[in-house]
Each structure stands twice: as C-alpha cells, then as structure tokens.
Image: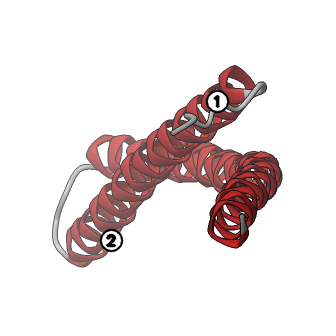
Amino acid sequence: MAKFEYAYQKIVDLKSSEKTQAEWLLSAAFGKLQSEETTLDNLLQERESWSSRLQEASLTAVPLSDLMIMQHYVDFIDSSITSKRIDVSKARQQVDDSRTFLSDKMMDEKVWQKSKERALNRFRTMLQLKEQNEMDELATVRYMTSVT
C-alpha cells in the first residue's frame, strides 16, 4: 500500500511551530501584565497606608518637617502610581497584540492543516480508485477464464 507524503509538510510544521511561539509570547505578556498589576496594587496599598499615617500625624503634635517629609513621600508614591498605570496600560496593549498575533498564527495553521486534509482525502480517493480498478480487472480475468 502506498504511503501518504504531503509535499508541504515542512510548511505545516513551520506554521504549527509559529503558533506555539505565539502562545508562548501571549503567556509571557500575561505574566508581565500580572506582575505590573501586582506592583500597582502594592503601590496603591502603600499610598493608602501613608495617607492614613499622614492624616493621623496631622492630628497629633508632629514636627512640620516630618509632615512635609511624609507628604513628599506620598507625592512620590502618587507619581509612581501614575507611572505604573502607564506600564499596566502598555502591558494590556501587549496582551491584546499577542492575542491578535496568536489568532493570526492559528488561522495560518488551520489553513495549512485543511490543505493537508484535502490532499490526504484526494490521496485516499485515488488509492480507492486504483484498488477498485484492480478488483475490476481481477473479476474480468476470472470471468474470462471461467467462460473459456
């Protein structure tokens, strides 16, 4: 029996490999987004904590210089939060871009897989036709030998 060999198998393998790499990129983008969001959450908690300390300190007898230092630190945290929100936004965009890229690679792979399936179906059909012709020829020979 003949063996099916797809002429474009290397392209199918390449498309599958590209899809796998796109999956890895998406996974890395998700990891980066998670990391950025965790850092942002930590900064927000730290800001809340320092704001509470500043509020409490303003109600007690604390030197003005200490209050100013605390306020400067809260301002620093605020600027860090703003910067981190930009980082989170960029990470979300990277996740979206990675999703789109993966979607494109999945479509490419699917197109080539379908092409391979169609070629396999054509091969099987041709094989069945060949086998049927051989059976018909055998039946004809048998009939001819029995008639004579």
Disc 2 element: helix
Residue drawn at (36%, 63%) of the image:
41
* Residue furthest top as drawn: 10
Q: Quadrant of residue 145?
A: bottom right
Query: Where residue 89 sits in the image (x, y, percent)?
Result: 69, 55
Give the left or right position of residue 43, taking residue 77 as reference: left
In the image, which disc is placed on residue 48?
2
Categorize mark 1 by other alpha carbons within 10 Å: few (<14), some (14-19), many (20+).
few
The secondary structure type at the circle numbered 1 is loop
Residue displayed at 69% across by 70% down? 143
Q: Residue at x 55, y 34 (%)?
A: 3
> Which is nearer the N-term, disc 2 or disc 1?
1
* Quadrant assignment, res 2: top right
Q: Quadrant of the C terminus?
A: bottom right
Q: Amino acid at mark 1?
A: Glu
Residue sitting nearer the eye, 98 or 2: 2
Along the horizontal axis of the image, is 56 left or right of 133? left
In the picture provided, is 124 more to the left or to the right than 73?
right
Across and down, in percent, residue 104 comes to: 81, 51
